[in-house]
Image (cartoon, grey):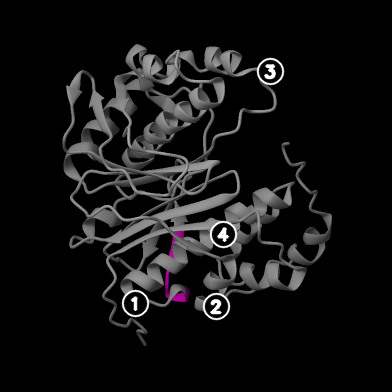
Amino acid sequence: MSTTTTTSKQWLRLAVNVASWAPTESVFRRALSCIQQEEQARILRFVFIDDAKSSLVGRLLMRYAVQELTGTQHEECKFERTDRGKPLLAAPSLPLLFNVSHAGDYAVMAATTTPNPSHTANPQTQPSVARDHSPGIDSDSAEVEQDMAFSSRDSQLLGVDVMDKRKPNAVESVPAYFDLMRKQFTPDEWTRIEHPSKSHDAQLLEFYRYWCLKESYIKAVGIGLGMDLQRLSFVADSALNASNTHVCAAATVTIDGTLRRDWMFEQQHLDERHCVALARNFEATPQPFTFLSVEDLLCTLEPHFAVHEAAASKFPSFRQKIKRL
C-alpha cells in the first residue's frame, strides 16, 4: 500500500551542525536503522567518528528530502549508486532533485521537486550526494566534455557545496597553499582572491568562496574534478559578508569564454567559518539555509532497516578525529 501523502513544499535548503552531535551508541544505532544496510556498511568502514557522522547525516538528509518534498515515506525508497559512486534514487520514480555536501562542522543539502520525473530517473543527470574532493584528480577529457554538454543544456541541475575556510594543517602558510592551488583558478579569479588590500585571512576566505562556487557547479553537472577548472571563471557576489548570513545571488560564471546567464548561484555564510554555495540552471527564488539538528531528522524518520551486525563492535572502536586548532 502506498503511504504517499500530499505536500506543498517545493524546496529544502538545510544545514546540520554535525560536529555538535554527540550520539550515544543507542542513538547512533537508531540513526543507522533509518538507512539501507549497504550504506550502513559503508559508514561503519570509516576510521574516524566525525567522518562516519557526516556521511550518516548526509544519508538521513536525502531520506528527509524524499519524505518532506514528495510525501513518500522514506522506507519505500531505494537508493543505489552509479558507476561513479554517486547515490541516486532508484525507486520509486519521483520528481526530485537533490545534492548533499559536508565539510568542517556542517552537512548541507539542497533539494527541490521538478515537474518532470525523467530529470531524476537518469543517473547521468540526477544530482546527488558528493564527497568533497581534492584537486588533481584526472579523468578522460572526452567523457568530461560530453557530460558537460549533455547535462548543462538538457536537464534541470542542482548542486551544493559547503566549505570550511581554515587553512589545511599540512600547509605552512596561505601563500604556500595558494601556490599549490594555482592551476584551479583563472588569472582574473586570482586577481580578486589575492587583492593586495586584503589580509591573508581575508584572501583565504575569498579563495573558499570561489572554490565553493566551482564545486557547486561541477557537482550539479556531475563530472567531478576531472575537468580543467580554468574553463570556469567566476565573479563572486561582492555583497557576501562573513559577518551575516544573508543570501547573495549575484555571482556569475563564464564557461569557455562565454558568460552563462542560464546558470544561477546562491551564496551564504552559515557562520564566520563556513560558506555554502548553491548552483542551479533553472529559475528559483533565493532562500537562506534552514538549520536543523540531527534530532530533528530522527524525529521525522522512522527506523525501518535492520542494523548492520558490525555496528555492535564498531561504535566503541571509532577513533576520535583530532580537531584543528
322 relative to 289, above or below: above
Q: Which residue is mark 4?
A: 57
The answer to if 78 sits in the magenta stretch is yes
Q: Residue lying farthest bottom?
A: 1
Q: Which residues are magenta?
A: 75-79
The answer to if 262 sits in the magenta stretch is no
Tell me the amino acid under the disc marked 2.
Cys
Distance, label 1 to label 3, CA atoms, is 50 Å
Residue 57 spot, x, y in % from top left: 56, 59
Which tag, 4 or 2, sits closer to the chain's start?
4
Distance, label 3 to label 2, CA atoms, is 43 Å
Residue 321 appears in which quarter of the rendering? top right
Q: Secondary structure at mark 2?
A: helix
Residue 100 spot, x, y in % from top left: 45, 51
Residue 198 spot, x, y in % from top left: 47, 20
Residue 230 spot, x, y in % from top left: 35, 18
Q: Which residue is mark 1?
A: 71
